[in-house]
Image: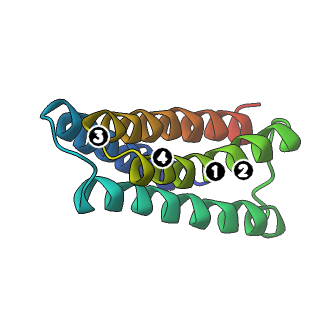
Amino acid sequence: MIWGYTIAQVALACAAGLICVISGLAGRKPNDPSLGSLVLVELALIAQLVIAIIAPGLGNQPVGSVPEFYVYLISALLIPPLAVFWALIERTRWSSVVLGVAAFAIAVMVFRMQQIWGLG
């Protein structure tokens, strides 16, 4: 994994988490900014998948467990669509908070993926 991209992903996920949690605690139902922020997080994860597939061929070999890394990555890829699906079905202020919690979970998972890839 690329350290700079990891930092960008974590920052994006934390920003999305803050937008969603603050929106939810302010009483707002899921809206374009909160749902859109999770779409951006998902797009960054898809790019991470592409990077993870290409990187070993370019000499950036993982140090840790490759299966563990991909389990984290695939799990992280599933969280935003599931959270958005929930938010669209149950449109309450708490759905916005759930979107935020999902984004913060992604931030933690991306940081852990960096540890697995680079630190073993």
From mark 3 to mark 2, how far is it between C-alphas? 28 Å
Mark whose residue sits in front, 1 or 4:
4
Q: How is the image coloured?
A: rainbow
- The amino acid marked with disc number 2 is Ile
Mark 3 or mark 4: which comes first in sequence?
A: 4
Q: Secondary structure at mark 4?
A: helix
Q: Which residue is mark 2?
A: 74
- The amino acid marked with disc number 3 is Thr
Q: Which residue is mark 1?
A: 78
Residue 21 position (above or below residue 56)? above
From mark 3 to mark 4, how far is it between C-alphas? 10 Å
Q: Secondary structure at mark 3?
A: loop
Q: Position of residue 81 (x, y in %)?
A: 54, 55
Q: Position of residue 68 (x, y in %)?
A: 81, 37
Q: Which residue is mark 4?
A: 86
What residue lies at 65% left-to-right and 40% top-to-bottom?
113
